[in-house]
Image: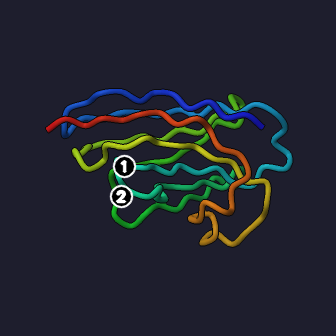
Amino acid sequence: VQLQASGGGLVQAGGSLRLSCAASGRTDNRYAMGWFRQAPGKEREFVATIRWSSSSTSYADSLKGRFTISRDIAKNTVYLQMSSLKPEDTAVYYCAASQRYYDSYYYTRQSSYDNWGQGTLVTVSS
């Protein structure tokens, strides 16, 4: 499975941005996809995850209400809609795919994912 993230860029605080992650390869063994981010000088952290079949979602508590994850099965793509962006949202955003079944909580962990995209940079100016 190859993942190609796109949609990053420079946006003013309060603005919106939608990231896309196009996946190639089989989907019958894909259980979930997720977004993580890594800000300068910080560790990579969980943002959101979505189960591929049911589309049930989970979010980092601090991002609920501002970020929305979704997926389009026909396009084999997962999205991250980000709104009311803040300078502290500045980071490289990575998408990931998991080929293993877990209870939802475990998809907040990086180790639960098998494939990673290259990352797309989001910069929020104040």
Residue type, numbered disc 2: Leu
For image coordinates 43% across by 41% down, the residue present is 92
Left or right, 89 with reference to 18: left
For image coordinates 68% across by 54% down, the residue present is 32
Left or right, 9 with reference to 56: left
73 shown above or below 49 = above
Dot 2 or dot 1: first in sequence order is: 1
Report the residue marked by disc 2. Answer: 63
Residue 59 location (% of width, % of height): 47, 61
Residue 37 location (% of width, % of height): 45, 49
**Which of pointers 2 and 1 indicates the residue nearer the eye?**
1
> Quick one: label 2, few (<14), some, or many (20+) residues within 10 Å?
some
Image quadrant containing the N terminus: top right
Residue 89 location (% of width, % of height): 31, 47
For image coordinates 57% across by 55% down, the residue present is 49
83 shown above or below 56 = above
> Quick one: label 1, few (<14), some, or many (20+) residues within 10 Å?
some
Instruction: Classify mark 1: helix, strand or loop.
Output: loop
Q: Nearer the viewer, residue 34 or 56?
A: 34
Report the residue marked by disc 1. Answer: 39
